[in-house]
Image (cartoon, helix red, strand yellow):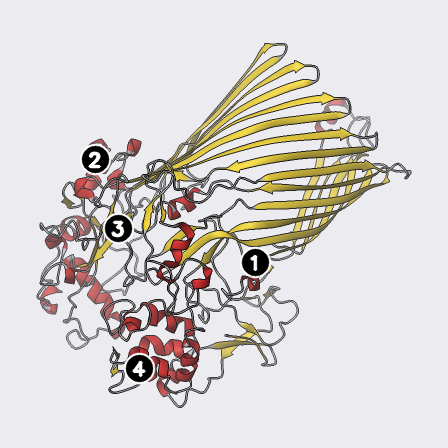
Amino acid sequence: LFSDVKDPFRTRIDPVWVGPQYLKRMPLPNDWTVGDGLNTAGIRWQRRLAGLDGATGDTQTTNRNQYNMRFDYQLNGSNKVSYSLTRENNWGVTGQTGLPDWPGGYFGEIRRDPTFSTASWISTISPTIVNEFRWGRNVDTWGGMQPTDLNCCKGGVFDTSKLTAWAKEAMAAFPQIAGQRFAILQGMVGPPAGTWSPLMQFADTLSWTRGSHSFQGGFEATYSSSGQIDAINSRPTANLGVGTVAIAGITTTNFRGLNTNDITTAQNLLANLAGSIDSLAQDFFLLSPNEKEFRGFQNGGVLKNRNYHQNDYAGFFKDSWKVTSNLTLNLGVRYDLYGTPYDSTGMGVKPIGGQAALFGSSGKDFSARFRPGATGGSPTIIGFAGKHSPNADTLIYNNDLNNIAPSFGFSWNVPWFKRSTVVRGGYGINYTGAPTFLQYSSIIGGAPGSSLSISRAPGVLVPSQYLDIASAMAPGIFPLPTGGIRPLEPVPVTNRVTGLQGFADDRVVPYVPNWNLSVQQELVKNLTLEVRYVGSKGTKLRSAKELNTINIFENGILDAFNITRAGGNAPLFDAMLNGIQIGTITVGRNGSGSEALRQFATTNQWIANGEVARVADFLNSSSTGTGEAGGLLRRNGFPENFVVVNPQFGSLQLHGNDDSSNYHSLQTSVRKRLSRGLSGELNYTWSRALGNSAAGNANTGDTTTSERDPRNRQLQKGLLTFHRTQGLKAHGTWELPFGPNRALLSAAPVWINRIVEGWNVSGIFSWNSGQPLSILTTRRTLDSRANINTPDLVGVLPDGLGKVRQGDGFVEYFNGLSTQRASAPNFGGNTTVAGRFSNQVVVDSAGNIVLQNP
């Protein structure tokens, strides 16, 4: 292969790793159903998994040992103490930590060791006064190690001397640089990582009665934290591939019978065998907030260590008042204080100036959005914040101190009816401010400037522009050059890719008022009917708002786009792109700005299909023709913020309280109490759940950033993903009539009665109407940050949409609907743009358009 290709750089199989380690361990292929049948094939073998964990770290299929203990002791007639402990040891394997590709390979490992313990002290102070003190502690842990790192990181310290024998054997299979494994990603998986999340709670409840009142009062104190370690890509990392220097010798001319479609596969095969490097990567970070330079693996920067905390407190008082024999009132109030999160390592960060700083040079508030050329602010700078940081008095966001939650309820036994009739109702407020540590890790611990990820192609590292595994280990390659970037330096406007998230200064705890009213009527003896109305309203729900929404209106880009799409020449694009070469056209010399965008392969597909937001984002962030991001605006004097409010960044999210929801339901139930061996219940619910956000984001704890129109978030309002219009549930139990004192076999011999008596038949039934249907389009018109666009409904959706129809060997979900190519708009005779048009429409059985792209 090497002698036939005659590549001057790739002359042999890599002698450092590919040959002596990778190929040496690779068994002969035995699966010819994959690959091309000649050069590539597969390996099929039985891989035994000793306990398998999933990506979320909470799968029930790991190996597990569980230990339970409970202790109860009556101190005296008035005092009792108890203690319970549950401890688990879970271990197994997962794709995240490494599964072998063939026999004799190495497994990574995960370990989870949750511990849950509780204690209580119940004291009877007097016949009418009881006090209960409670304590609980729960610790969730997760540790994932790839084969070369087993046992590397106990106590949050990276120490290769403590590796297991298996890990040392796996480590020896890879080259090393400065004592660290050279991570060649063709055969590697994620770095070592771990979390430990202790939660401890103290609570006390004092209960006493006085006359017709039953009082309760108490407090709760909750201390929660989440420690996280992660090696990310701190050690030297290589991605194999063709790299900067192309392979010219693999062509259909040089190799007879080579299919054109297989040229790329053949080139990658040669590059991988030769150990050619496509890119090198290394992450740097800080070990303390006082450091002035980033650390790499050579000087101890292997493990990133963070520890996020939130402390919460609550107090409550309630009274159950028996007003009359038929009327009971429940009155109460609760106060919740949810603490502001912080990083106890002192490494928490936020934009200096808080929310106002997110708008960068454009201004300090929302008035800066959609104003091309706006001024009044300054570049966004990240600084340390929160407890234990150099700026300990600067909170991540302001404290929220007014979380007062009243509650009221009543139960009235109506005395005027022959059979029992009870009317119940209530109103209350619940605050929901539990910590979301994954979000804190992303926002408080992941802001740009507190860590640094470097990826370099060989062309910028060595004069020859070619690197392989052997030459990448030479002195001077690692640590990778950082370009002089120092911690917490402002992100330059030539970046435009790095994301930033920040909290609103006045971010508060969401709350949910809920209310209900019900009537319960006894129909006949042991049979009751209950009708309930239940409602709630999610208020000030936490949300993530995208600030760097692509602007196509106020800057004239939409008008220029429409002119260009129709085959005309937009003056805006002529002025913006003058003198810049885009594709084969230098604007102002051999074509206009619109002509350049129409002939350029990247942009003409967007022009053809109406994706104006993609074109605007290209003008904002592409380096085409200028060599620097934003150069298409900067070259001819257009403002940096012509398209987005803060051009330092790509995505720019503000986490505040912009969302809401409401829920209304009518619930009915028929309940049969046990009589004549029969009991059961039938429930029917009609409900509606509405909100202005599709769903919560499990990764951040906030609702989604997707918006149909960022200028009017209320257009998001609609059915929520958990909405179900109707629900029907039933359960019942029938005691079979066999045995003594029953209808059948009551006089049977004793031994028969012992066999047939005590048998029950029970059943459960549940049915819900379907989840709301969401129809999206991948076309980006108003924004290009996320797939948020919905098609236009221009016809009538057929009845029964979404019902499943089974055919001969197929299943059809949208009977009566089909897709067809949309009618092409007038492109002014431009055949290049017309050839890139690929929009589809959804039509009904009569061919009428129902849905089309916006």
Image vertical order of residue 190 relative to residue 372, above or below? above
Assess whether mark 3 and mark 4 are in contact (beta carbons under 8 angstroms). no
Name the residue beneath numbered marker 3.
452
Question: Which circle, 2 or 3, is nearer the viewer?
Answer: 3
Quadrant of the image occupied by residue 802: bottom right
Q: Which of marks 4 and 1 is nearer the N terminus?
A: 4
Q: Residue at x 44, y 67 (%)?
A: 370
Name the residue beneath numbered marker 1.
692
Q: Taking 199 as reference, is 305 left or right? A: left
- Quadrant location of the N terminus in the rendered image: bottom left
Q: Which of marks 2 and 4 is nearer the N terminus?
A: 2
Query: Which of 113 and 569 lies nearest the eye of the viewer?
Result: 569
Q: Taking 357 as reference, is 718 left or right? A: right
**Does dot 3 land on a helix, a strand or a loop?**
strand
For marks 4 and 3, give the CA distance: 36 Å
For marks 1 and 3, give the CA distance: 36 Å
Task: Please state which amino acid type lies under the numbered disc 4.
Answer: Ala
Name the residue beneath numbered marker 2.
160
For marks 2 and 4, give the CA distance: 56 Å
For marks 1 and 2, give the CA distance: 51 Å
**Does dot 2 land on a helix, a strand or a loop?**
helix
**Does dot 4 land on a helix, a strand or a loop?**
helix
